Image (cartoon, grey):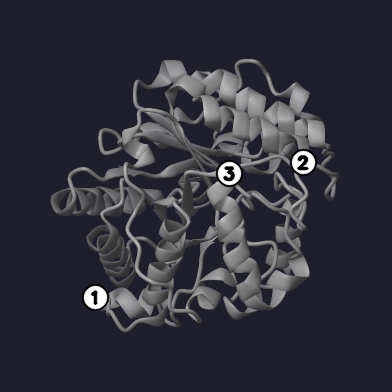
Amino acid sequence: MRRVPLILLSLGFAILACTIAPAPAGPPQPSIFDSGRTAYGFFPSPPEATLQSVLGHFHSLGDHADFVLIQPNIPWEEVLAGASSESPRLTDIRNQVTLAHQDGLDVVFVVDPLNGLNRREFLGLPEGWTASFATPEVRSAFSNFALWITREFRPRFLGLASEINTYADAHPEDFPHFLSLYREVYAAVKAESPETQVFATFQWEDLNNLLAVAAEGRAPYQTNWEQVEAFEPQLDLWVISSYPFAVFQSGAEIPDDYYTLLLSRTERPLAVAEGGYTSEPVGPFPGTPQDQVDYLNAIHSQLGGRLRFWVYLLLNDFHPDSYADAMRQNGLGDDDINTLGMFTAVGLREADGTPKPALAIWDSFRGSD
């Protein structure tokens, strides 16, 4: 497994959503985020990159989730001089939000400047732009995009980068530039929308140096807390991603204190912004339906009382061939497409909607928390 392949992009979805004109709809009231209980969500990635699959998938999400996590990559050139209402990619995002609201779902946003299947690199930078958070154009586009989301949607939760510790490991010289940009945008978002809770996400297995190729010689469980604490106090909650099938032979092997380290390290609210466990072997990694159950139970038993929201990556498994063309159109190559294949069986249902045992566990947590 690559160092940081730990996200399934909603490729194919945004452009498909732009082919329809959904009727405007407001967020659900009362909001799940005002209830005091954990909110449960998924990425809105359908089993196939087709319009019919998109629409049917949103209806299914409404039965098993409180919100969707929308994680757009930055449309660099479109927002460099300020967000335009005529921008197709911004219209795509509006349509995603509308589809969510129509099915009773709220939204959490994460702004993503990086390649979700290889977080050592930016995604989609225009020709001639230097791939660094010190680059003026990168900083302006990042800030403009985050502020457009803030003004347009007034989100309760807004992430300003996903699994940023993996980029910090690969580019330690550039990490201070990202930190300074994060602080600038944090302040600007708060000036526009004080109630918006701002965060970045951190990849838990990498943070704990459990991925040998990403540990830089550090011992397992030598947690890189400094990478998280560098964001304080401009970190409204601590948010992780976790895919332990990359390091354990089964879900039952997840230690009883695997996630509880967070409880004693911070008093901030906690969240899981993505994660999952494969229900069948993929590449070198084993997996069974029971492993998914054990993974869900581990997070719920160890962190449940502190979670503001919890995102499981996929409701349904997906057909990778259906995504390949859309991925290539978004600048991703065969290596990324092959990496995506590692996540085809992470869903809590088969691609045809047949539930796996873990879905009943997920629904029971959602109904009781």
Residue at label 1?
82
Helix, strand or loop at disc 1? loop
Dot 1 amino acid type:
Gly
User: Residue 3 at what x, y percent from top left?
Assistant: 65, 49
Say which residue appears at 55% left-offset and 76% top-offset.
16
User: Residue 44 at what x, y percent from top left?
Assistant: 55, 57
Say which residue appears at 60% left-offset and 80% top-offset.
329
Helix, strand or loop at disc 3? helix
Give above or below for 16 relative to 98: below
> Mark 3 or mark 2, which is nearer the start of the sequence?
3
Residue 247 seen in the figure: no
Say which residue appears at 18% left-offset and 54% top-offset.
188
Residue at label 3?
64
User: How many labels sit on residues?
Assistant: 3
User: Residue 102 at what x, y percent from top left?
Assistant: 44, 60
Q: Residue furthest left?
A: 191
The residues bearing labels 2 and 3 have C-alpha atoms spaced at a distance of 13 Å
> Mark 2 or mark 1, which is nearer the start of the sequence?
1
Numbered label attached to residue 356: 2
**345 and 59: which one is in front?**
59
User: Residue 136 at what x, y percent from top left?
Assistant: 28, 69
> Mark 3 or mark 1, which is nearer the start of the sequence?
3
The residues bearing labels 1 and 2 have C-alpha atoms spaced at a distance of 45 Å
Position of 100 compared to 7: left or right?
left
Nearer to us of marks 1 and 3 is 3
Dot 2 amino acid type:
Lys
